[in-house]
Amino acid sequence: MAESSKKENGVSSDKSQEEEKAKSKEEKTEELPDTSYRANLPKAIFVEDVDKFMQEPGNSSAEQVLRRFDELHTKYKFMESNLLEKKRRLRNRLPDIQKTLNMIKYLKSIQGSDKSFTTHYQLSGGVHGTAEVPPTDIVYLWLGANVMLEYPIDEAMELLTNNLDNAVKSLNGVEEDLEYITEQCTTLEVAMTRVYNWDVKERREKKLASLQQQLQQ
Amino acid sequence: MAAIPKGKGEIGKDMVVLFEDQQKINLFAKKNSLLNDIKDQITEKERIFKNVEDAADELILFDDDQMVPYEIGEVFVLLSLEEAQQKLEDYKLELQKELDKLKEQASSIEELLSKVKSQLYAKFGDNINLEADS
């Protein structure tokens, strides 16, 4: 708080531009087209008839089949956690972009008037200063990688709106991928359960048969 | 993750699972996780909504000529009481709209889920568990 007077005097339009810079920093995060997980992910096969399935070559024992399923399941889970992380990041980015956009909108709403506004801005964690910001036509957007560019307000708004749209789009893409994975996982889980149950039943029958044989002898 | 269908009963007669059933199970799992997600979003939005309401209530105590530091983006802008109240009101309306939309989605998903659930239980009985793990 002691520092708050530091910036109070000598507020000129230079200073206010400096303000804009601080305020409007926003990473222009390019959304690369998602290489969809769906394309590279093996589809879980649906087992309709367990008996028949177990006769197929390569499925000699239930153990072996279950191990194979389990490996695939681990893969799905791994990708699921990756995607969840990605989703969380995107979700967090939305409010950031929205915040910046709100500021730009406010600047636009006073654009052309002579109504400057007083603001408390953060000098550093917990320390705020006061500054007078006159209406402005340009803002500076932080594009990331230590680059900042000057934009007219309308263009800045357009850019940010685009960024917001892109973020929403890739969020939707991630959500679709997640749905796909859930689907594969569930299919696989059902198959695993059924093969397991099939195996238990098979063993029991074999045991029963051998018992009966012993009795007959 | 809730509602992973699993045969939990004793291995009685072999259940015939058709592709159609599998698709229903998948649909259930998918929509169920979507529902949870939407419910989380609703909780979060309601929290913000409550905060905005509290802020609006506080503002009533302000004098008319007092300036209000209102957070826009990363900084606080001094707004007149009237402007600040207007902005809060707009924000509230916007949140309310989003909440209504989410709630509508949630209830249509719930409807679908209960339909699929009864179909699956009718077919598989005790061999399937569609309840959320608590």
Image: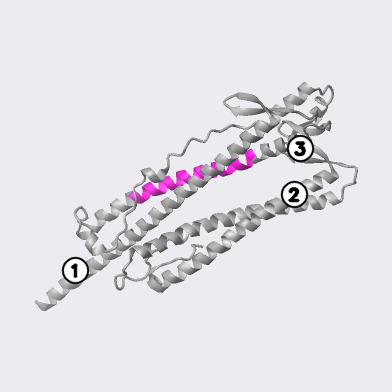
**Residue A89 part of the magenta segment:** yes
The percent coordinates of residue B130 (x first, y second) are 45, 65
Q: Chain of mark 3?
A: A
Check disc 1 and report the residue beneath it.
A206
Give the image location of residue B44, x and y in percent: 63, 52
Res. B133 mark:
none
* Residue B7 lies in quadrant: bottom left
What residue is pinned by disc 3?
Answer: A109
Q: Disc 2 designates what residue?
A: B90
Q: Farthest residue toward the left?
A: A217
Tell me which amino acid carries mark 3. Answer: Ser
Q: Give residue A40's position: percent from left, percent from top.
A: 36, 43
Instruction: From the image, give the main secondary structure of the stretch colored magenta.
Output: helix
Q: Amino acid at mark 1?
A: Lys
Tell whether B110 sits left or right of A9: left
Tell me what residue is drawn at x 59 percent, y 37 percent: A162
Specify start and end residues of the magenta stretch as a single range: A72-97
Residue B33 against residue A123 in the figure, above or below: below
Q: Residue at x 81, y 53 (%)?
A: B57
Does mark 1 fall on the same chain as mark 3?
A: yes
